[in-house]
Amino acid sequence: MSAVADQLRVALVTGASRGIGAAIAARLASDHFVVGTATSDAGAAAISELLGENGTGMVMRVDDEDSVASLYATLAQQDRAPLVLVNNAGITRDNLLMRMKPEEWGAVIDTNLTGLYRVVKPALRAMMKARWGRIVNLSSVVARMGNPGQSNYVASKAGIEGFTRSLALEIASRGITVNAVAPGFIETDMTAELTPEQVELMLARVPLGAMGTVADVAAAVAFLAGEGAGYITGETLQVNGGLHMS
C-alpha cells in the first residue's frame, strides 16, 4: 500500500467512471484514498487514471452478490476496508407503467435499491469496529416529486431515502452517519443530449435559473462524508436549485 493510502481513510464510491460518480471520487481523493468502481475493465482503468496515486479503479457490479463479495475480499486483503461509502451506481429503464416490461422494473429495483443492500451490509463491520463511518446514498429530486415514465426509478430512489433513515437509526450509536443527496437537473452526458427547447422548459421550473453541475453534487457528498457533518444523520440533502423544497 502506498504512503498516501496509509495516511488516509478509504472511501468506496460506486459508479465512479463518469459523471457525478467521477466528480465525487475526484473530490474525495483530496483527503481520502478512493476506491472507485465500474462495471467494466475500461471503466476501472479510467478511474485509476483519474485518481492517480490517491485511488484506484476496480470492477464491481452492484447487481451481482458474488461481484460485491469479491471486491470486499480484495479490499480486506489490501487492508483497505472503507470507512466512507458513497452509493452512486444506478440505472434507468424508462417507460410508462402500462408498457413497462417486468425486466425493466426488476433491473432498476435490483440495481438501484437491492444493490444498496448488497454494498452497504459488508461495509458495516469495519465501520462498527472503528466506531466511525460515513455512508452517503445518491437519491434524486424525483423521489419527492415523481416523474411520469419513471415509476421504477422513482420507486427505487424513494426506497433509498427510506433505507437511509432506517439504517441511520440502527447504527447511530456506533458513530456512523447515513445520509442521502438528491440531485435535481445536473449537467451530465445525459442532459447534454437535450434540445435547447427542452433545457429552457426545465430551467423555467428552477428558481435559481440554471442547471447544477457535478461539482455541486460532489461538494454536498464531500460535506456529508467529512468530520463537519458528524451531527447530521438520516437526512436527505436536496441539490436542485430550488426545484423542490422540503
Image (cartoon, rainbow, N blue to C red):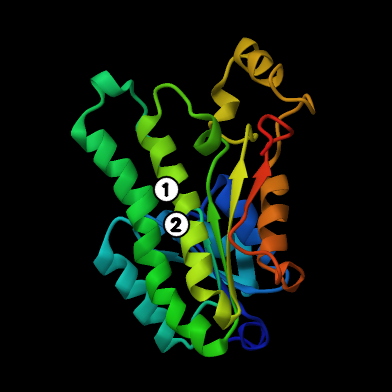
What residue do we see at 54% from left, 65% from top? 48
Query: Residue 191's quadrant in the figure?
Result: top right
**Label 2 Cα crowd, 10 Å radius (few <14 / some 14-19 / many 20+):** some
Residue 80 appears in the picture as rendered? no
Residue type pointed to by label 1: Gly
Give the secondary structure at mark 1.
Answer: helix
In the image, residue 1 above or below residue 188: below
Residue identified by numbered label 1: 159
Q: In the image, which disc is placed on residue 195?
A: none
Q: Residue lying farthest left?
A: 102
x then y, percent, for residue 151: 37, 30
- The quadrant the C terminus occupies is top right
Residue type pointed to by label 2: Phe
Left or right of 84, for residue 219: right
x then y, percent, for residue 125: 43, 83
What residue do we see at 62% from left, 80% from top? 9
Residue identified by numbered label 2: 163
Left or right of 38, for residue 205: right
What residue do we see at 61% from left, 60% from top? 25
